[in-house]
Image (cartoon, rainbow, N blue to C red):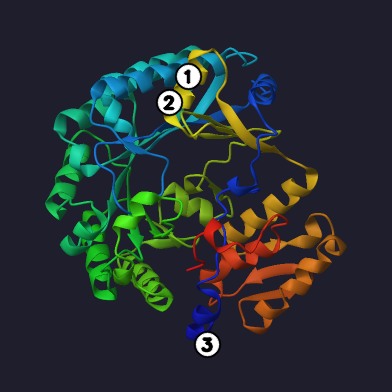
Amino acid sequence: MTNNLVSRYGGLPVPRYTSYPTAAEFSPSVGPTDYGNWLSRIDAKESVSVYLHVPFCRDLCHYCGCHTKMARRDDVIASYRESLEAEIVLAGAQFPSQLKLARLHWGGGTPSIVGAEGMASIVDVLKRYFVFEPDCEHAVELDPRYVDDAFARKLVALGVNRVSLGVQDLDPAVQVAIGRVQPQAVVETAVNALRAAGLEHINFDLMYGLPLQTEESVRRTCAAVAALSPERIACYGYAHMPSRKRHQRLIDEETLPDVAERFRQSRVVAETFLAHGYVSIGIDHFARPDDPLALAAKEGRLHRNFQGYTDDDRPILIGFGASAISRLANGFAQNVPDISTYQRIVAEGILPTARGCRFTDRDRTRSEIIEQLMCNFRADLASLDGPEEFADELAFLRPLIVDGIVTVQDHRVTVTEQGKPFVRLVAAVFDQYREEEPKRFSKAI
């Protein structure tokens, strides 16, 4: 039955639902004035999360789907850092008072490209407008090729207490095909340096569905990763959208696995990590049983945001940097993605908000349903707007019920065990904005 489900549903384009409404629904109707007003209304008694986006890498990997560019010149990187700091000042001027900071996450790109001194400079600016809570989680995404003992010690001195290493795949042929050559020994050296510096909270980022990957090569990569014993692993399905990301045209499409093979690879990933003592979190994360993320999933406290699955329950996320997205009580606001435009606007003393969306009550309800489905594989419609509000959605679920993907009882929607890989399709039923446009989203599997 599962093979039939994969052939029927696996290739359908659906959002990843790291937000709702998704970024595809953002529009210029939200601008700098709106965002400034929203910032001024933040409840200073509540702690918040912050995301810092650094859109540069020394080399651009073929598979990358992030808002990032290749940068070799240090002056270009330093200029961007100054703009990022200037944006923090502009936003901070709108705050009702200093805000309590519970989570700080650096993403990109390769955020460490600004250097330890550059990161320290940015943190100093943040501390003018945020009070770091004693147990603040301070996380940064790292390229293992640029981690050594000295840099690891500097991260610890800066207060970093969690890192995510971009590994993707350890097979040499796959690494050449994706333009990301980093031998396993390089990854091991980075892990050893981080642990020697006292950084024990280590995440790995992997991918399946890459060119030249096979079930066996994926199994070898996962086994080697498990042997390094990271606390968490995220393994995402590669989204090949060369019409939107031109550098992905460097990948030979003939070497990409088909939908059925992608599904088998995803199953191999899960089987391997479960066999090594990890527990499954949602559709693409794994963690040690005693990890806070695993405990949050077990206790029904799991959430989902632009970084994937998280135990972060703060309703406010403030994003800084080109393309960064903020989530406030009133809605989403996204910065202009073009780096030079971002820097010009900030230099003019204007918040670089380019687009976003305002939340309606209906958005909030459907967001809760979609997050419940994505995190817990179930949603109780009767506890929300009432079953009559979802009559159309329940009708659209009927084919998925017949195919054994979901069950509906007393208006409780539950994704079955065999239906879990297709949970994004179930979530999409409750997405009032969704359009059938293949180029907008990645495949369901």
**Circle number at residue 340:** 2
Residue at the spot 22% in from the left edge and 38% down from the top edge: 194
The quadrant in which residue 260 appears is: bottom left
Closer to the N terminus: mark 1 or mark 3?
3
List the residue tagged with mark 1. 344
Task: Note whether 259 is above or below 64 in the view shown.
Answer: below
Q: Are the residues at dot 2 and dot 1 in contact (C-beta closer than 8 Å)?
A: yes
Locate residue 90, reporting x and y percent: 54, 15
Label 2 residue SS: helix
Marks counted in the figure total: 3
Locate residue 114, reporting x and y percent: 29, 26
Give the label, 1 or 3, closer to the camera.
1
List the residue tagged with mark 3. 1
The quadrant in which residue 34 appears is: top right
Q: CA distance from mark 2 to mark 1?
A: 6 Å
Q: Is residue 251 left or right of residue 386?
A: left
User: The disc labelled 3 sits on which kind of residue?
Assistant: Met
Closer to the N terminus: mark 2 or mark 3?
3
Label 1 crowd bin: few (<14), some (14–19), many (20+), radius 10 Å: few
Label 2 crowd bin: few (<14), some (14–19), many (20+), radius 10 Å: few
